[in-house]
Amino acid sequence: MDFKDSPEEATFRDQAATWLKANVPAPAELDGLSEMERGKLWQKRKADAGWACIRWPEEYGGRGANAIQQVILNQEESKVAAPATGQFSIGQGMAAPTMMTWATEEQKTRFLPKLASGEEIWCQLFSEPAGGSDLAALRTKAVKDGDDWVINGQKIWTSGAHYSDWGILVLRTDPDVPKHQGLSYFFLDMKSPGIEIKPIKQISGAANFNEVYFTDVRVSDTQRLGEVGQGWQVALTTLMNERASIGGGGGGAGVKQALKLANSVNIDDKPASKDRQVRAKLADWYVKEAGIKYTGYRSMTALSRGEIPGPENSIGKLVGAPKSQDLASFAIDLQEMGGVMWSPGENDFDNLFQSSFMGIPGLRIAGGTDEIMANIIAERVLGLPQEPRMDKGIPFTEVPTGS
Amino acid sequence: MNFEFSEEQNLLREQARGFLQDNCSTKVVRESLENGGEFNKELWRKVAEMGWTSTVIPEEYDGLGLSYFELSVIADELGRALAPLPFSSSVYLGTEAILAAGSNTQKESWLPKLASGEAIATFAIAEGNGQTTAASLTTTAEGASITGTKVPVPDGDIADVAVVVTKSATGDGASWYLVPLDQPGVHREKVSTLDPSRTYATITFNAASAELMGAEGNGWASTQSLYDRAAILFAWEQTGGSDAALEMAKNYALGRYAFGRPIASYQAIKHKLADMYVKNTLARSNCYYGAWALDSNAPNLPLAAATARVAATQAYYYASKENIQTHGGMGFTWEFDCQFHYRRAKVLSVVIGNESQWQDKLVTGLEAGLDEDAA
């Protein structure tokens, strides 16, 4: 065991680091640009030099790199002060792999290079008010009309809908068959007439997601991915990639910050960090942080050997999000009455735990709730059976609902 | 990145697992439980013959001179099999102590015998209930003899030699003495314990002849560093046991029906088993890092050890108790095997310092910035 690169990996790391250092935008270059403009500038520069979406085939804007090279590039990019490019992650991480598998050659050539370069931004329209953990219960319907489909209904929790150019979505095209069989998958222009986007204000005060309403929105049948009624299978391609990209378990405050806080506040006139109970909690959270990190190393090793990472990789979010929530809650306790003070939007140390406390509930839900993640581990890793279902084999219209 | 066992090490794992399945089924564990912890000499002989006791002992002392990765693999499998053997006392504690502090003569007289399994070593520190510290020690040394009572001493009833922690007037307040146990000044009595498949004894030293090992007044520091190394190997045993307990719970839940379906299909059970899997995975990954830190003698070894130890202690406790819970009433019967993990998990959790002490050490490691050095 060691943590060294193989010779090929070391060469690649060198190349990547050299290019990144030479090309990362200087502060002056970014002056006066919005976050979005900065991200677009950087993404385009990477794409022009072949450093964007490197795992994709060359003809679609990548360089046919392997998974470990992607990890190495990410590590090196995190070392330079590059503009954030999170706005492209849904398109590149979820829409693109779906297009790669299901779109026509012409569509791939048209859309993938612009996804890689950040010239076009994509969003994902899956969740609905009546379809979250049970995604296949979605109701937004599409009715065939000539060469088009006409969409009516509502999507929810759509990140970046307001700045996206294109969206991927699953729609109910046949309500009279069992629910998984009546779905079809499309992509559409987010500027189409009849689309209305409303931001959702979260408990933290921020608005990272949207509701998207569809009123008689037309989409061409040529923008269907997979057969009519095959939407669920296509959606699985997207979801597998969502789990791969959300798997990290990061986010929120960590043990390092909590220890710093515990050194700065007292319990019974002594630093809180000397209190055995405080130390026990810090230790337990560190065990989780380190465990996730080293589990990641094991996955990276599998990638480095050209293997698929084992199921252990699926624990990150399930461990990380509740840990950050408990840690933030405890840190506020340590601040005693002072813990009530919070200036939303401020990112300094004084506001860190409060911001984390108010933001983390969302992380325990996004991309699969804790409960769904536990089901996934139970069913796919341990091989335990599903719960019996009330909606199996009956037409969607006859499935019991709460509304 | 090469954070994985080698092919040879995985092969060793397969061999070890196969051997233990054939020679150390839970039937064997049950025998030791029911016969009052009679030493299974035959199993010990076979294990020693395969070289497990000599894994990390250098070749000059008749050992195999292999790495701590091999020893980690063996510990993992011994834990999984609940092996009723003095392996941890003799290998992780006794042998390690002699390797760390023994003089050439001491090494020459004991390591070859420990390597071959002919001799068993142990580490004697506790003096009754409660935390032992350098200040609380009452066992004393005078010249080449020691006097005092150590209880409970793991495998103290069958060990041939003990490293005994005694009070010292100098240095950190403690010294190590190497004491052959087959002598008139030593009186031993087996004590009854939570897990009779692993035995303990009260050992009374009455001017027993003993040799100072390492420097006078350095015994407490030596103990801490011995514990850091041993903690990683104990953590592997605990992790192996946790995985075995999860497998037991899973197999039972798949076969047991209630209200017309397998209890494994209820989310209450599925989520319980998923929690076990998560805790076991965190423990295992932290043990991986621990094995690396141990083998490379990394400066952040104390932090890596505490992290693996806390993770594994928590994982095994959880898996062992929830395995009983998953089995329902049958899990509480003498006839079922669930009890073995429940007993072993608790015994392993206090053998080299309890969870709270290791949590404390972990944070001490963070305060020393050892996480900054971490790879």
Image (tube, grey):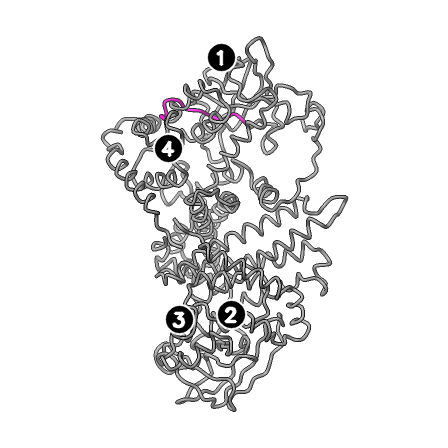
> Looking at the image, is mark 1 or mark 3 nearer the viewer?
3
* Distance CA(mark 4)–CA(mark 3): 48 Å
Say which amino acid is labelled 1. Pro
> Looking at the image, is mark 4 or mark 3 nearer the viewer?
3
Say which amino acid is labelled 2. Ser
* Distance CA(mark 1)–CA(mark 3): 78 Å
- Quadrant in the picture for the C terminus of chain A: top right
User: Which subunit holds the residue at mark 2?
Assistant: B
Out of A51 and A354, give the one closest to the viewer.
A51
User: Which subunit holds the residue at mark 1?
Assistant: A
Q: Is residue A222 above or below residue B274?
A: above
Q: Work out whether mark 2 precedes mark 3 in sequence or the reverse, and give the earlier one.
A: 3
Q: Which residue is mark 3?
A: B58
Q: Which residue is mark 1?
A: A193
Q: Which residue is mark 2?
A: B88
> Looking at the image, is mark 1 or mark 2 nearer the viewer?
2
Q: Residues within 10 Å of mark 2 (few under 14, many from 20)?
A: many
The answer to the question of whether label 4 and label 2 lie on touching residues, with beta carbons closer than 8 A, is no
Residue furthest top in the image: A146
Magenta residues?
Answer: A117-126
- Image x and y of residue B101, in percent: 38, 76
- Image x and y of residue B91, in percent: 48, 71
User: Which subunit holds the residue at mark 4?
Assistant: A
Q: Which residue is mark 4?
A: A54
